Amino acid sequence: MTRKTTHFGFQTVDEDAKAGMVHGVFSRVASKYDIMNDLMSVGIHRVWKTAMMDWLTPRNGQRLLDVAGGTGDIAFRFLDRAPGARVTVCDLTESMLIEGRGRAEAARLDDRLDWVVGDAMALPFADNSFDRYTISFGIRNVTRIPDALAEAYRVLKPGGRLMVLEFSQIPVPALQWAYDRYSFNVIPAMGQAVAGDRDSYQYLVESIRRFPDQDTFADMISAAGLGRVQYRNLSMGIAALHSGWKL
């Protein structure tokens, strides 16, 4: 029987092993995850998430599923725009959800939030359950991205919308080269200094480089059955927003 393999950063690993390895990464960095996001992006991830909400236009009464939502950053932003909405945060890593639940209780938002341990490739929700599906800096960690996109399509209601925020590729080679130098030389060292974990942040940098470019990922969303697929580059393509609809 042929072994099915995938990538874990720049390593080739058995498909069955990847989810556990990703779980290990995020279990180790959970307590420092939000601080590291600010440091790694010099706070720009906040601007990107604001752009995500501007395009998503949350509305009261909507049900959002935020996959790989961990510490609740997207969920809180959605509820800030639509206090009458309800959000389910789903993540593979319970320690990330625990961090998020603590933040929600402190902000007195826990009555509008549900926290569920689950796998993006096999979501524990019924068909046609949600108006919106978001995944922010999480889909590149999924073992089989097409399976996750198929699940997004399944759980969205007809007329529902998918939105993905993910690191992407800069279309200017010289700028990509400079960004690579920063990513590989600075971010793992920062992870060691702040979180005491160089290897996890080395993986995160490598996983960004392995993720498909904007057009390829847009084609993957279309292949999952979603329509009106579009993307917008953020910060010259360091990150990108992809949108699609269940028509």
Image (cartoon, rainbow, N blue to C red):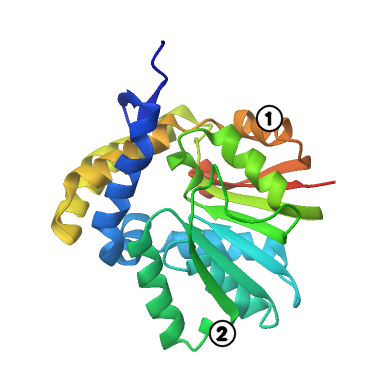
Q: Which quadrant of the view contains residue 132?
A: bottom right
- Rendered location of residue 185, percent (x, y): 22, 40
Q: Residue at x 68, y 78 (%)?
A: 82
Q: Is residue 14 left or right of residue 187?
A: right
* Label 2 CA crowd tier, 10 Å (few <14, some 14–19, many 20+): few
**Which of the numbered marks, if any, corresponds to residue 47?**
none
Q: Earlier in the sequence, mark 1 or mark 2?
A: 2
Few, some or many C-alpha atoms within 10 Å of disc 1 (few <14, some 14-19, many ≥20)?
few
Please state which of residues 23 and 202 is positioned toward the viewer in this rendering. Answer: 23
Viewer-proximal residue, 1 or 202? 1
**Screen quadrant of the N terminus:** top left
Q: CA distance from mark 1 to mark 2?
A: 38 Å
Q: Is residue 35 above or below residue 204?
A: below
* Marker disc for residue 111: 2
Question: Which residue is labeled 1 in the image?
Answer: 219
Q: Residue at x 50, y 39 (%)?
A: 168
Left or right: 169 as drawn, with respect to 2: right
Kindly report which numbered mark, 1 or 2, lies closer to the viewer in this rendering. 2
Q: Amino acid at mark 2?
A: Asp
**What secondary structure is marked by label 2?**
helix
**Image: 224 above or below 119:** above
The answer to whether residue 137 is above or below residue 58 is: above
Q: Are marks 1 and 2 in contact (CB under 8 Å)?
A: no
Image position, residue 231 (x, y; %) = 67, 43
